[in-house]
Image: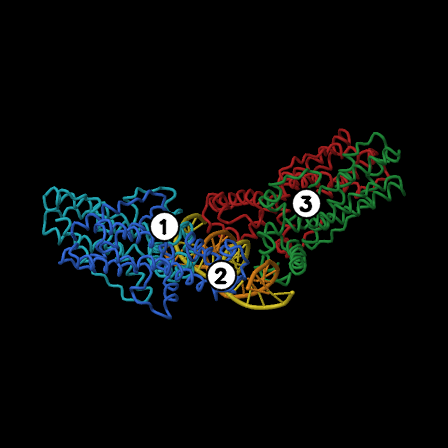
Chain colours: A red, B green, C cyan, D blue, E orange, F yellow
Amino acid sequence: MSGRGEATRQQLLDAAEGVFAERGYARATTKEIAKAAGVSEGTIYRHFADKQQLFQAVFIDRNAANSAAITQLPDLAGKKTVRENLLFLIHAIEDVEANVAPLQAAMSSDAELAAALFSSAGPARAEMPGVAPLEPLARYLEAEQKLGRVRADVDVARAAFALFAIPFAAVMTGRMARAAGVPGDVDMVGAVDVVLKGIE
Amino acid sequence: MSGRGEATRQQLLDAAEGVFAERGYARATTKEIAKAAGVSEGTIYRHFADKQQLFQAVFIDRNAANSAAITQLPDLAGKKTVRENLLFLIHAIEDVEANVAPLQAAMSSDAELAAALFSSAGPARAEMPGVAPLEPLARYLEAEQKLGRVRADVDVARAAFALFAIPFAAVMTGRMARAAGVPGDVDMVGAVDVVLKGIE
Amino acid sequence: MSGRGEATRQQLLDAAEGVFAERGYARATTKEIAKAAGVSEGTIYRHFADKQQLFQAVFIDRNAANSAAITQLPDLAGKKTVRENLLFLIHAIEDVEANVAPLQAAMSSDAELAAALFSSAGPARAEMPGVAPLEPLARYLEAEQKLGRVRADVDVARAAFALFAIPFAAVMTGRMARAAGVPGDVDMVGAVDVVLKGIE
Amino acid sequence: MSGRGEATRQQLLDAAEGVFAERGYARATTKEIAKAAGVSEGTIYRHFADKQQLFQAVFIDRNAANSAAITQLPDLAGKKTVRENLLFLIHAIEDVEANVAPLQAAMSSDAELAAALFSSAGPARAEMPGVAPLEPLARYLEAEQKLGRVRADVDVARAAFALFAIPFAAVMTGRMARAAGVPGDVDMVGAVDVVLKGIE
DNA sequence: GATGAATGAGTATTCATTCAT
DNA sequence: TATGAATGAATACTCATTCAT
């Protein structure tokens, strides 16, 4: 809320996000982050207790922005076609995952880091970054079910997972493929259409 | 003729797999790996040029065993029911992913590592660990399609991805959830049933 | 403005010179150098990119001081006697060589080090440490030749080498003898007198 | 004197000389020496107590061969011209120094190594490798002096050093120059001629 | 005698973190 | 607040040496 201090904090968060995403948590050095933020190394420690706290801050920050975007999506129910809405949703999830994936990867390859991050306040599963979109997706399907645009015998939770899995897997395998230097494009739309047939 | 040396190599591969999975690539120290293998640190370098090569060896080793198991699964076509076969396949994929996931995570959080690993002999996407099951799955669906047990208008490649995404996402999110100390069980069977409805 | 940092750098240069001279390049450990300089090991790398650059810095530093002393000696021509001047020169060269010899030894026993040191900016032979005194010596003889105090038929370059070789060999063999625990004194003055007879 | 054992010992000495000369003592690894000798690493220790003893053996071996060549040179006195004989001598010394120089450099840059080498039996200065040629050279001059071909007022010891210094310095500076990638040719003959003028 | 697998002490270098200015 | 010099613990890797076969 104040001037100088808050500004550098934001610079640090932005710089850190980029470096963490590019290099991974372990390979990201405080030196590089400081340089990217245009501040001295010592300055990091005036704003964050240590590297882990900086990571956590980035993670929370990014996730807040993303989940805000997704949470209000169930309102689409009833408008346009189900297919259009679902494709919209799927791409939204893809964006979210693409944003969080690098941070997630860093976390999931480092048990200690993950544990430390969630140790104090074990978050509800719904709030867990990366899985967060599941809930709004289920609620959207439920809404459409009430409107009769989704079959009554569909288990919305299961269906939500089947749909969510598509952009999730697409982003993850895409990352790996790119890292390996292989073209990793996936036809998400086609895959969603398959699932759609079982739902509508 | 392959006595002492080969045995040590195996011990190292086994120990390394565990440590890499637990700590991630960067946090895994050669010291810890050597200790877990019950050998001295120097011994690692008699068997592997460096840490990266050790990781690569573990990765290839594990993946070879796993993909062997999956590749011969398309033969199931025509036997039992499609649902039984698919559930069997999905669980097989789950096993594979569960095995490779930790190494994958280690890799995908470290772009440089991944690049180095696949740089020399860029593998075809089909051989890429983690995505390898996609191909056999598609071939299985194709076989069933010819037998009339899968709808003719289904794009088998897209459907395969939709199915593959389920155990893939289940394993990955499960790992993350466990790391975060949250119960992360997913009803894979239910999700597969949703997709099945669009296929059969 | 050049306070703390510059002081530490000087301490490091001084300490490193001693350790390199005593132990040779390879046997000189960064640990010992740091200890001798009264700083931590990490500090070395804040001032020098690596051990080799530290050595190079020491080498250049020492040589700069020494060659400055010698370069202005040709001005002696015409004053005192030729013999007095030459003996003065010869002792000056002895001092220079005594200073540079340990570093030279460290270098000449390590071809890769030497190559690396001079690779980028291949210096002219005249500037090469250890041989640097040759040129001023030749110029002094030339000046005396014009004054008629050195025979006209003397090739000054050759004569300079014959004279230069005396303190050079004296210092080098002296070092070796001392290392071997043998008294290695050489009568440089007598040797110079022999050469003088062929010149005057 | 026996078959296999003695042969491998010689192979090791030859290989070691090459590697020591090329890499210097510290940079020379037992692995590389063993490979160059075409034997296994362990074999070295069947023939030499440790790396230092191997170095010592090489050093003594090489020096014995060289000094044998030089010791019998004083017999030249009276034959041909003094200049021809001296040039012949100077080139012989050059050869000796060229052979021993790398080993010498290794030694003189490593006080501990030198001390260890000469610790047990402190050799007389005359036997000290690298300075060994001084004595025969002095004796040759003395012989010529008696024959009246060298001036009576010349101090043969001093003159010997002045002459010896020329090939010594030529070889040493030549090594350094070559290492630095600079052409380091020296006109030894011209330098000797200068000294000759003071002697004949 | 010879091998080569195993050792473990040692080395240069990195990097998160601290602290005087 | 910010700096950047200093730290020191940690790390991957090397290499002379040992020893069972």
Looking at the picture, which amino acid does disc 1 mark? Gln
Q: Residue B86: x, y in percent?
A: 83, 42
Label 3 chain ID: A
SS category of the residue bearing label 3? loop
How many residues crowd around disc 3 within 10 Å: few (fewer than 14), some, or many (20 or more)? many
Q: Residue C44: x, y in percent?
A: 41, 55
Residue depicted at 50% across the width and 62% down the height: D6
Q: Kindly report the distance in space between the C-alpha atoms of the residues bearing marks 1 and 2.
A: 39 Å
Whether residue C68 is visible here, answered yes or no, is no
Q: Which residue is mark 2?
A: D9
Residue C56 numbered tag = 1
The foreground one among A121 and B123 is B123
Q: Quadrant of residue C192?
A: bottom left
Looking at the picture, which amino acid does disc 2 mark? Arg
Q: Kindly report the distance in space between the C-alpha atoms of the residues bearing marks 1 and 3.
A: 52 Å
Residue found at the very far right of the displayed protein: B80
Whether residue B5 is visible here, answered yes or no, is yes
SS category of the residue bearing label 2? helix
Q: Nearer the viewer, mark 3 or mark 2?
A: 2
SS category of the residue bearing label 1? helix
Residue depicted at 39% across the width and 67% down the height: D116
Label 2 chain ID: D
Tell me if C53 is positioned left or right of C98 in this view: right
The foreground one among A108 and C120 is C120
Q: Kindly report the distance in space between the C-alpha atoms of the residues bearing marks 3 and 2.
A: 67 Å
Residue A130 numbered tag = 3
Residue found at the very far front of the displayed protein: D79
